[in-house]
Image: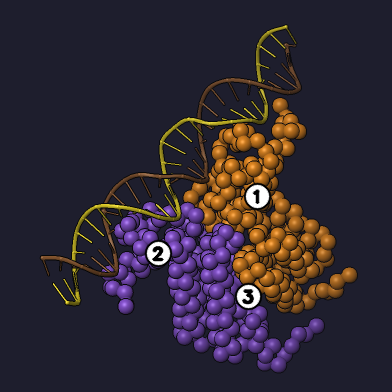
Chain colours: A orange, B purple, C yellow, D brown
Amino acid sequence: MLTDVSDATTRERMISTAMTLFRREGYQATSWRRLVEQAGTPWGSAYHHFPGGKEQLAVAAIELGTAVVAKTVRRAFERNETVEDAVGWWYRKAGEALAADDYRGGCPLATITLEMAHASPAITEACQDAFAAWHVLLVELLTGHGAENAEDLATAIVNNLEGALLVSRIRRSPDPLERAARHVALVVGATRQSRAGTGERG
Amino acid sequence: MLTDVSDATTRERMISTAMTLFRREGYQATSWRRLVEQAGTPWGSAYHHFPGGKEQLAVAAIELGTAVVAKTVRRAFERNETVEDAVGWWYRKAGEALAADDYRGGCPLATITLEMAHASPAITEACQDAFAAWHVLLVELLTGHGAENAEDLATAIVNNLEGALLVSRIRRSPDPLERAARHVALVVGATRQSRAGTGERG
DNA sequence: ATTTTCCTAAGACGATCGTCCTAGTCAAGG
DNA sequence: CCTTGACTAGGACGATCGTCTTAGGAAAAT
């Protein structure tokens, strides 16, 4: 009853390609036909793997995007001791990915979120879950690293990244993202001062 | 030859409705037919007023959105003395408009920016001009109000608003936007402290 | 060998899209 | 009167969309 390897491969390639195309061009501009062509997956299998249609594919792609971002966040806090360094690493990684993709990418969920926020309940819910998951994860990591007002800080970190990704993308420049990284690092540092901590990086 | 009143009315209604629909549902989901139906303008006049097609309409709608936001920013700095109050007023206004529109709206340019950033050069350029105009305007107003690092501050203000509008919209809650307002006010205040002479302590 | 199950090929289907076109209305200037 | 120009009604056009269907092929199970 477990899915075949080949089966999972076709399905996963569709989801992965969907995430990429939704990120680059959005939901509406991504058609099944162009997706299967880019993914190299059989066109006849679309509604076999996704009987719920394009909407179901989108939900799966959103869940993948959620996991990918969450993984990046966890890695950022694993490889860096202070909150400033972790957030800076995360933002820098996002900027590098954006530039490497010739400013076609950005947040994997931002475009589809704005497009479908009121058009599809299923997609809306998936996007809500994504942002909620990121927020909870960030609060947990921030608290674990001794941050004071983790709720406010997590919101600010996500807000700044989303906004900076948008502005950097349309400007085709890493500048807004880099400014955002310095901005958030400064805010985190200022917050920590009130806590009278150690604040020395290894 | 100046345009007729009736002529301008039809054209302007089309542009205004386009701005609203592009903001709510994006560029791809907004068709000419639904637009003229909503605007109450004649369907046969679409390519008379916009021979450049939907793309030309979009550019006009983006320019309108640019002007509308710029007007709000100017008003914010007219009605408030301090930078904190001005930005807080702006953010609060954005949050009220978002909630009043049942969280369908947000930034009038964000969705179309993400959708068309690589699909249409004309629309891309219009969006670039918009963000550049906002940035220049903000730097000018911030500098006029005695802010120190106006470039960084303007970037942070726009980044936070764009991100907060996205997150508030998908969460259907004013909370991220309100947190962003407090966040920016705090940052502006902290920046002003350093201008008084006290630098970093540690 | 035969049945069952999973997957794919290929396209039909109706709907909707952006665009364009032609005939016609209407107001103003001769 | 007639002419001219701006504007509109209404639909045709080809393309593309998401969805669904039918037939067939390839393993796996019996």
Which image quadrant for residue A131?
bottom right
- Asked whether, in this view, residue A92 is left or right of residue A151, the answer is right
Instruction: Give the x, y percent position of residue B167.
Output: 57, 61
Which amino acid is tagged 3? Ala
Q: Tell me what residue is drawn at x 63 percent, y 75 percent.
A: B156
Asked if the residue under mark 3 is in contact with the one under mark 2, i.e. CB atoms within 8 Å, the reply is no
How dense is the environment of label 1, judged by Cα within 10 Å: few (below 14), some, or many (20 and up)? many
Chain holding disc 1: A
The subunit letter for the residue under badge 3 reads B
Amino acid residing under circle 2:
Phe
Marks 2, 1: nearer the viewer = 2
Q: Is residue B29 above or below residue A4?
A: below
Please tell me which residue lies in front, A115 or A37. A37
The residue that label 1 is drawn on is A19
According to the image, label 2 marks what residue?
Answer: B50
* Residue bearing the label numbered 3: B156
A101 or B2: nearer the eye? B2
Task: Classify B76 as above or below B163.
Answer: below
Asked if badges 2 and 3 are on one and the same chain, I answer: yes
Identity of the residue drawn at 76% across and 85% down: B200
Q: Tell me if label 2 and label 1 are in contact, CB under 8 Å.
A: no
Q: Residue D29's quadrant in the figure? A: top right
